[in-house]
Image (spheres, helix red, strand yellow):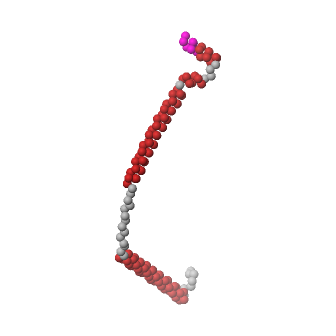
Amino acid sequence: MHLFPASDAFDEIHEKCEKLMWKVIEIRKHYGKQCIEYQQKSSQCEMSLLKLRLNTISKLKSPTRRHEIPKLPYREMMQDMDDFKSEISTNERNIQNLMKKIKTTEDIAVHIKSDKINKLAKKPFTVNTFLLAAKGNIQDGS
């Protein structure tokens, strides 16, 4: 069963629609070709304008400029360099002296930590502790 009855009018409309669709396809193809041609022609115009600009720029003569080399104060620069060198050497000596002082301070700190007399001085000194220490020495000796 067909949705539409088979008739000559329906066939005519169907043929007309098909012809119109083919026309639309042909028009789209033609329009696409025209767009491509337009893009190519506009690119050619842009290239010719660019070449023209490059030609005019290349034909222009630019004035030659003389660049004078500035005179540098050679003696003053050498003096500044010598001053800088002496400042660096002074700073190096100061750093070495500080490193020596730090080393001696570390040595003193290690010595103080290992000093037995200092440890004994920190303990509370009473008669009882003295007597206990003496008894311990007597018992160890016998």
- Residue 40 coordinates in the image, percent (x, y): 41, 79
Quadrant holding the C terminus: top right
From this view, report whether residue 75 is shown above or below residue 6. Answer: above
Q: Is residue 137 magenta?
A: yes
At x 37%, y 65%, the residue is 67
Q: Which quarter of the figure is the N terminus placed in?
A: bottom right
Q: Is 32 colored magenta in this rendering?
A: no
Tell me which segment is drawn in magenta: 136-142
Measuring 49% from the left and 30% from the top, which residue is drawn there? 107
Report x, y in % for residue 27.
Answer: 47, 83
Q: Which residue: 41% across, 46% down?
A: 85
* 13 left or right of 72 in image: right
Residue 64, compared with residue 100, is above or below; it is: below
Q: Is residue 127 left or right of residue 142?
A: right
- In the rendered image, is residue 11 in sight? no
Q: 17 or 1: nearer the eye?
A: 17
